[in-house]
Image (cartoon, rainbow, N blue to C red):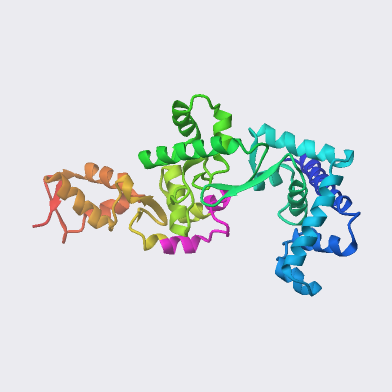
Amino acid sequence: MDNNQKRSQMKKNQKAQWLFLTLTNNLIADLGERSQEIIKKRFGLSVEKGETLEKIGTRYEVTRERIRQVIAESLKKVTDKIKEEEFEKVQQRIIFTIDKNNGIIKETDIIKKFNLEETKEANAIKFFVICLQDIYSIEEKGLIEKSWIMSKEILQNVKKIILTAEKIFQKEKKILSEKDIVEKISLLNPSFSSEQILNLLRVSVRVKKNNFNKWGLSTWDEISPKGTRERVYLLLKEKNKPLHFTEIAQLIDKYKIGKKKAHPQTIHNELIKDDRFVLIGRGVYALKEWGYFKGTIKEVIRDILKKYRQPLNKETIVGEVLKIRRVKKATVIINLNNSQLFQKKNNLYELKK
């Protein structure tokens, strides 16, 4: 993104933020001073996080139930006012955005689409939607994330697609590309378009996609890696090749796999302890499931000779070692010349008896 694009994006952000903060202030402007303060504190319009009914009640020395009544009365007045032209335009803008997503969108996603930060600006649009009669806020614990919908009838479709995807992953027992999961769902639900399937899946709690656009069950490490080792495993699986621990740290940050900055030494220390990873060179790690195994170069040569069960020439041994270790050819030869472990006859090497 060049400087002109950045400036343009900043202007869009500022405009969107100004719009919703100003909009909500105008919307509650006719309420009494105390009612305005209660609304702002409850819905995070004057602070970054909304306060509980109990905390607000304590401040005003009334019960939480009284605060609830004040909010309900205020919302009724605001709902009547929202039909005015000033607010109707914004309402249509939100409806258009939800409609483009097949009638449902995660609350966090629409905040991103409107370029709002997760603070007072984001809280402003959330409050605005609460006041609308044509948009519903829904959430089902363990199934659907907090989302906005145009019609409650869409919930049936959402559940159908999520449960279908869940059954597919339980059967496949592996992550799938976006194309693959959409195709498999389409076979079972031909009336849904690819775009519709993806939009419905995006609100799911049980089915998620990772940072490499691969889908799977949200509990899987390859979808939601919880620790350093899981993040490294996901990265190596995706890259499908051995990597140096410093490069692993850089790629974890690049693909935003972890919330905190990855530290190379921490990664190095963690991988040494985990049998899933094999150190195959100076700081270079591979996955054991790729056929690599732990051990020094001497031990690797020994295992190769045991595997073949016959003497081998130098070139064959070097070639086999270099398939599973990132070392110099000279390093292999030096270890091969260890007379305590290996003996040479007729230019062929074997284990010393």
| Residue 135, x across and y down, in percent | 71, 41
- Figure disc tally: 0
| Residue 178, x across and y down, in percent | 50, 35
Task: Say whether residue 258 is visible.
Answer: yes
Q: Residue at x 24, y 53 (%)?
A: 300
Relative placement, left or right, of 351 versus 27 is: left
Instruction: Give the answer, above or below, for where 148 lies relative to 59.
Output: above
Residue 230 belongs to the span the image colors magenta: no
Instruction: Give the answer, above or below, for where 177 lies relative to 287.
Output: above
Q: Nearer the viewer, residue 221 or 326?
A: 221
| Residue 304, x across and y down, in percent | 20, 48
| Residue 121, x across and y down, in percent | 77, 53
Q: Nearer the viewer, residue 292 or 139?
A: 139
- When asked about the image quadrant of residue 71, the answer is bottom right
- When asked about the image quadrant of residue 134, the answer is top right
Residue 258 belongs to the span the image colors magenta: yes
Q: Residue at x 15, y 50 (%)?
A: 306
Relative placement, left or right, of 343 versus 183 is: left
Q: Nearer the viewer, residue 113 or 246?
A: 113
Relative placement, left or right, of 242 versus 343 is: right
Q: Residue at x 84, y 45 (%)?
A: 80
Question: Where does the N terminus fall, quadrant-wise?
Answer: top right
Instruction: Give the answer, above or below, for where 88 lies relative to 299.
Output: above
Region rendered in magenta: 250-270
In the picture as drawn, the residue positioned furthest to the left comes out as 353
Q: Nearer the viewer, residue 1 or 61?
A: 61
Question: Where does the C terminus fall, quadrant-wise?
Answer: bottom left
